[in-house]
Amino acid sequence: MVTSIVNALGAGSGIDIKGLVTDLAAASREPKVTRISALVTANQARISAVAQARSDLVGFADSLEQMISDGSLRSTPTVSDESVLAATARAGLQADKFAATIVVNSLARAQSSYSGIIADKTAAIGTGTMTLTVNGVAKTITVGATNNSLEGLAAAINASGAGVTASLIADQGGSRLIVKGATGAANAFTLTADAGADPALAAFATDGGLAVGQSAANAEFTLDGIAFSRASNTIDDVVPGVSLTLKKAAPGQPVDIGANRPLDLIKQTVSDFVDVYNQLKKSLQAASKMSGPTTGLRELERELQGLASKVLTSHGSINKLADIGVSSTKDGLLSVDKTKLDAVLASDAGAVEGLFNPLRDGTHNTTTDPGIAGILDAIRDKAVATDGAIGRVEKSLTDKNKTLVDELAKVETREAAYKARLEKQYSTLDVKLNAFKATQAYLEQQIKLWNNSNND
């Protein structure tokens, strides 16, 4: 009788209320959290794959663009006498498009004038206005009470915006005013004292005490016998693709200029281009094979697939990568036929160079001759734009990740509430169980009393 009552009331059952609540809450929470966490992990893998594809594409385009912009793939100018002039390449120079002979007869010079008066730089020199004229443009120079000194006059000239520089040099215990213009005959200047100015200012006028140390002059030279005159010793508009710097006059001394083509580097670049393209292709394929929005990257894959057959220059017969031995394999990668590349370089190296270093002149521009860098840059910019293949996929995956994170937070909130309800319910049960046990103890006591009474 006692045993059955004890069992019914659970006495001595050792129920762990806290552990029971924990286990029940975990049984409800873990499958939901595991499912969402798996989705988050898969989505993060897609994000990483797309990020790798973006990095490969941007790095591919940027590195090629850098090589071209820094002149690595550009023909290099050669000069027979670098003591007379120097030459640097600009975009579009190609070795077989240029060779010439230059004779430098005179260098461009800037007018330099100096004052005959040597004075304390802070001492008064007289007040009034002066007129500084350069290439027909007049500027008013004012010397007043606040700047009545050599220092003040120099500062006023420099502040005029006339393109003339004034400075003071120490000379025999005082200072001398030096005024210098820009190179070129047209940049000769005059500085005159206006009517009403203190007579002392005439000492700093070109028609008074300001002597000419050097006259302004143009550079005079010939290119293949044709005479040229330029205001600067740096000349960018005579030789296509070349910037010339004249160093000294050498009348009657011809200087030959030409160009060397970096054939070995061009061949290496073609090989590197194929290798990097294939790495990019593999990263795109890996991302595209994943389920979900990443399949949108196939649009970019298809665009890159046509790169070998894309027209890059206006050359009649060698204007595509395919023309120099670059072709697609059956798995969508690129390969290079080095024998064909060598043959094309031997027959028309300029056309091959033009694929990477396209001509730039009156008829060749970024539209007619974009070059491989121009095409690749356009593909990159389109793909990473907000509405581009990579841009759209990245946005979709980012939105998906946010949705999953929000969903996980909601699950955690709901499960925390569920656990709180369980704790409340089982706490109530625990109270009732304690009451039952108290009743049980009372009954046991009464039963013992009954038994004792019966035995008596």
Image: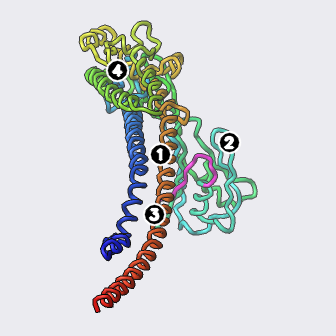
Q: Give the spatial CA distance, label 3 vs label 2.
A: 88 Å
Q: Dividing the picture into quarters, in which one does residue 285 lie?
A: top left
Query: Image height check: is 1 above or below 340?
Result: below
Q: Which residue is mark 4?
A: 258
Amino acid bearing label 4:
Gly
Q: Residue furthest right?
A: 196
Q: Give the spatial CA distance, label 4 vs label 1.
A: 59 Å
Q: Circle 1 — which element?
A: helix
**Tag of residue 419:** 3
- Residue at 35% x, 87% y: name it: 450
Q: Evaluate if marks 3 and 2 touch, with contact meaning CB atoms under 8 Å apart.
A: no
Query: Image height check: is 351 above or below 56?
Result: above
Amino acid bearing label 3:
Lys
Q: Circle 2 — which element?
A: strand
- Residue at 36% x, 61% y: name it: 23
Q: Is residue 73 left or right of residue 376?
A: left
Q: Is residue 382 left or right of residue 245?
A: right
Q: Give the spatial CA distance, label 4 vs label 2.
A: 41 Å
Is residue 107 rendered magenta in the image? Answer: no
Q: Evaluate if marks 4 and 2 touch, with contact meaning CB atoms under 8 Å apart.
A: no
Which of the marked residues, 4 or 1, is nearer the chain's N terminus? Answer: 4
Q: Give the spatial CA distance, label 3 vs label 4.
A: 84 Å
**Tag of residue 137:** 2
